[in-house]
Amino acid sequence: MASRSSALVRPAAFRSVGRSVLLTLPIALWSLVMFTPSLRQAGRDSHIGAVVVMLFMTTLFFLMMRTGETYRWRRIFFVALGFLFPFGFIAALVVQRGTMSIPISRMVSGDTPFCFMVTPSIILPAAFARTIIFPGSILPTASNHASIAIMIGLWFALTLVLGKAWCSYACFFGGIEEGFAAIAKRRRLHRFVTKYGHILRLIPWAILVFVVLVSAAIFEPVYCMWLCPFKAVTEFPAVRNVETAIQMGIFVALFIGLVVVLPFLTKKRTQCGFFCPFGAFQSLFNKIHLFEIRFDREKCVDCALCQTSCPTVALSKESIREGKTLLNCMKCGACVDACKKDAAVWHLKGTPVAVKPERARLLFLYGAWAMATMFGGSILANSVATMLHWLPWK
Amino acid sequence: MRARILAILAYTGAGLTLVVAACVPFFLMGAFSGLVAHAGLHIDATYSGGTIARTIQRNNYRIVVYQPVQPRMLERIEPFVQIVFEPADSLPAHVSDEVDLDGDGRPDVRVSFTVPANASVKLRGDVTALNGKYVSFAHVADESFSRMVVRTGNQIVVRVPLNKDVAGR
Amino acid sequence: MPALSFSASAGEALVLGLATGPVCLATCGPVVVPWLMVQPQGVRLHSRQLGLFLAARLAGYMVFAAAVWLAAAAIPHAWTGRSWLMGGIELLLAAGLVVYAVGWPHRRCVAAKATSSLVQIGDAPPPQPSGALALGFLTGINLCPPFLVAGVRAAQLPSLSASLLFFLFFFAGTVVWFLPFLSLGLVRRTPAVVTVARMVAVLLACWYGFSGVSILIERAIHG
């Protein structure tokens, strides 16, 4: 299989089938280890879900090895995760309580599953008052496995490996807008994004500072209660008065605008790049993460294809001139795959740029894909099992 | 020489990242979760209802009275006291109980509600304040975090607002 | 109500201020942080600006101290009017934040030169004392519970000057908690940092505006 750029500059980056299989073996083994518990569980649907996802993740990794490209194969996994996670989540809610809305009784009983996006908001109250401003439970209960301790532990462990690449390999929401961004053939509003991108990409930082300050002041998870677009496709406080009705309106408007319409029009991940405070928070880890994307200035011809392809405006003319991405780069690989001169390369900090970039890519991908399989893969398997369970002809 | 040392460190770091990745599901995640669990954190009283003040035993059930919850400076809830009736299965069909909330030996509120046979049916209740410290309400289910009569699992949770002027706000 | 001895009340005021400092931080932090981040870099400049802010906050405290002492008998009435005052203050804070975030006086000057390239969104505007004074005063008369507790105590004192001195000591206790804000003067002011600070100020203005309107509407409906 040859990629589009094979006729131009890319050297023998395409591997033979044999070598690709060899390189894929660790991931195949890892998948087997991760899904063996599911295979041991009772239930044919769980078994099928596990096998399907094991093959899915292994095949995608094989294709990454075979073609030398990252972005389009990662995107298939990510879009699947983005659409199947809400499906599985909503299905579980409907079975449990017949509605997506969270009644106050569930918040009072600590049954609200913890979501990562609230992590920045809870840090200051936890640090200064030892108080978690979230209606969950610290330890898992019979009705809430996504307890605060479990989810924070998971988040921290995954962040150690992924850093900001969380937004490309772990976030179970980002795939929704990546999916809508992929639908349109042509970019609209391109000029607007190009002209104002340098301001738009600062908005997540402002929202991060805002939610951290106000959450600490009023001891309420402000982002969850007022600004999260994904409440529209998971669960939301039950509408019982004017305030909760306004909240619901904001959630739906943000979801339609930032997650559906704008990604379709701009072919960018507008919620991720121009709004999400958790993404800004994760960007801080790019300072210490070992893997990054760099630009070989000797090969670069300043065609700006990388800039156009970047889904979150993490590149500017100045940064490319310096041979770097901006802090909000989520290591999706779009720019590397788009570059026709192989100037955009994967890089391990501390090593020379553009020397053995494929080695850096492999080292990064093994860690990232392992985490994607463990976390996103298990969500996918669960959702597939749920779909099978609900098949009408069963 | 410096470049070589940096490269060695870089690849060591990359290798360690892979080791960490391998350890995540088997060890690391559990370790970090344990750290959080033992960090002495607690859920905000707005959600948890605060700390238990006393328990009043009735015939087949008990009433757990919590300490009053005073909102912090900019918190947008009214001050309240949480009362829990448990176990819900052992409650009579209709409950009308006078409860001493501040431990002075005199009842402060009368709580009334009918326990539906079907646990999924929404509960509604009345609270009548017997002195000026508390606020009465009627036919309330889950109006707000400060005033509610709800069923959670095998408990009936009632939250009675405190009179703000008396509570010092 | 028995009058309190001055030494006992001064000590109590200081301790009350120290104990409620974190509350003051939570109230004032969202206003101070973005506003200071919009100012140019420099610890000395920040010290001056923060000094003006705190001085104006002290002025707010003194106004309140005088008001509670003079209206000691009418405190129950003051409670019911408190919501109107809170709502109004929050709306004023919102307006103040927008004005100083957008850099209104700064833009007036550069607009006169009629060159769009001069209006750089990332530029830090020149420091404006009126911003420090306005924001400081508005946060100073924000009627939080510890503030009201201090007010009740001050109203018990035998003279107006004793009430003012009580609040001076209360204020001194809270000031300690503001010293860490000086470290913001060390943060490098890139255009991105200043832009983010302005955006935060606008977001906070929206929040205070919404909060103020909610309080006023609720007061109007429920009386």
Image (cartoon, rainbow, N blue to C red):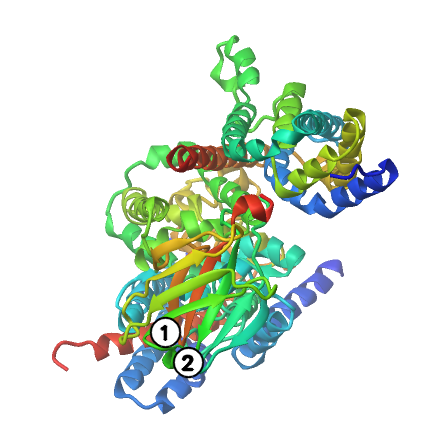
Quarter of the N terminus of chain A within the rendering:
bottom left
Q: Badge 2: how crowded within 10 Å, few (<14), some, or many (20+)?
A: many
Which secondary structure, mark 1? helix
Residue sitting nearer the eye, A277 or A129: A129
User: Does the image show residue A310?
Assistant: no
Percent position of residue A377, x then y? 38, 73
At x 56%, y 11%, the residue is C109
Compare marks 1 and 2 and give the one earlier in the sequence.
Answer: 2
Q: How many marks?
A: 2
Secondary structure under the numbered disc 2 in the rendered image? helix
Q: Nearer the viewer, residue A82 or C168?
A: C168
Q: Is residue C197 left or right of residue A373?
A: right
Looking at the image, is B119 positioned above or below residue C85? below
Instruction: Give the residue pinned by disc 2.
Output: A31
In the orientation shown, which residue stands out farthest toward the left? A393
* Residue density around tag 1, few if under 14, some if 14–19, many if 20 or more, within 10 Å: many
Q: Quadrant of residue B122?
A: bottom left
Identify whether A228 is placed above or below A134: above
Mark 1 vs 2: CB contact within 8 A:
yes
Residue C109 in view here: yes
Q: Residue at x 67, y 30 (%)?
A: C72
Quadrant of res B90: bottom left
Give residue C215's position: percent from left, percent from top.
45, 36
Would you name the residue on which mark 1 appears? A57
